[in-house]
């Protein structure tokens, strides 16, 4: 199954499992000597898997993913808090703070794109992305809390945790079936969502008032809710890819890709929750 998350797209576990099962006659998930028959080394999307095994590289574990995800998310949170404290959005400093936030967002985007096309994960790129993303989120959150909806940031953080926990429970209980069809549907929906968002921004930039109406009023809230649902769907895809990587014996360095994908998804969810709560508070 190819995930729609560009940072985890090389973990094609379910698709390779199906092809291996058809080739060997063994059912998907069958084991030989306690190891999955669909070993990661048979995955054509695995970056330099043979080299990793020849040089003594070890397989990724769930602990590896947890530790690296904690480091990446911790970097986002730390830089967000520091930017909130050190880059105030009052009238005397708003121009500088906004400029640094926009610059940080652009740098984070460039680092993310570089990592997404690399064959192997680069921790420096991933942590750099997290740091600059945190600066952007810190200034944005401070602005929303100061000028739009005081206290909404805490609600958005709690909402992000709630959505993430709900997605995890739904995945573990198999209420969400992460199949090839599911991945394709989520990818198509996300593409349409992003295109509509850009169209809305373009209409707004060229003097169309509220653009397509996706950033205000009831339509904006509905659009944000769709974004939250998409984020939860991406989390399910991320969980599946992590599960497959561990089961198929992916190299340990791939845990950084898991951390990268999970972090970008959680940032997406936070931004959408923040937008919905801000619109709801401004309309009430």
Image (cartoon, rainbow, N blue to C red):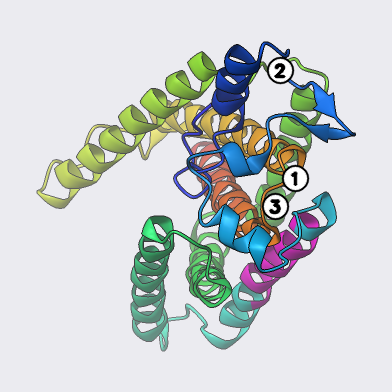
Residue under circle 2? 28
- Mark toward the start of the polypeptide (2 vs 1): 2
User: Mark 2 to mark 1: distance in Å?
Assistant: 33 Å
For residue 255: magenta? no
The answer to whether residue 176 is above or below residue 235 is above
Q: Nearer the viewer, mark 3 or mark 2?
A: 2
Q: Determine whether label 1 and label 3 are within 8 Å by CB.
A: yes
Dot 3: within a 10 Å radius of its alpha carbon, few (fewer than 14), some, or many (20 or more) residues? some
Q: Which is the main secondary structure of the residues drawn in magenta?
A: helix
Q: Which residues are magenta?
A: 65-78
Residue placed under numbered mark 3 in the picture: 157
Query: Residue placed at 55% from the left, 20% from the top?
Result: 19
Determine the secondary structure under disc 3.
Answer: helix
Is 248 located above or below residue 80 in the figure?
above
The first of marks 3 and 2 along the sequence is 2
The quarter of the picture where residue 190 lies is: top left
Is residue 176 or residue 83 the one in the foreground? 176
């Amino acid at each position: 199954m190819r995930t729609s998350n560009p940072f985890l797209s090389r973990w094609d576990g379910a698709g390779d499992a199906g092809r291996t099962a058809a080739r060997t006659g063994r059912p998907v998930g069958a084991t030989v000597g306690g190891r999955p028959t669909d070993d990661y080394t048979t995955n054509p999307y695995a970056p330099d898997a043979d080299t990793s095994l020849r040089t003594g590289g070890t397989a990724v574990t769930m602990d590896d993913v947890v530790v690296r995800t904690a480091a990446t998310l911790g970097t986002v949170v730390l830089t967000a808090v520091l930017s909130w404290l050190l880059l105030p959005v009052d009238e005397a400093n708003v121009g500088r703070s906004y400029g640094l936030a926009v610059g940080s967002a652009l740098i984070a985007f460039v680092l993310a794109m570089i990592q997404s096309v690399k064959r192997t994960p680069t921790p420096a790129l991933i942590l750099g992305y997290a740091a600059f993303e945190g600066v952007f989120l810190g200034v944005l959150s401070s602005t929303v809390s100061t000028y739009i909806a005081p206290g909404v940031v805490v609600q958005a953080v709690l909402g992000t945790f709630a959505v993430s926990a709900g997605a995890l429970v739904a995945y573990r209980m198999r209420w969400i079936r992460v199949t090839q069809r599911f991945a394709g549907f989520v990818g198509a929906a996300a593409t349409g969502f992003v295109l509509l968002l850009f169209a809305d921004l373009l209409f707004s930039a060229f003097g169309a008032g509220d653009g397509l109406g996706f950033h205000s009023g009831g339509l904006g809230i509905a659009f944000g809710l769709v974004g939250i649902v998409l984020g939860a769907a991406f989390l399910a895809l991320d969980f599946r890819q992590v599960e497959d990587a561990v089961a198929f014996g992916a190299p340990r360095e791939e845990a950084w890709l898991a951390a990268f994908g999970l972090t970008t998804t959680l940032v997406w969810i936070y931004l959408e929750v923040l937008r919905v709560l801000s619109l709801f508070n401004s309309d009430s």
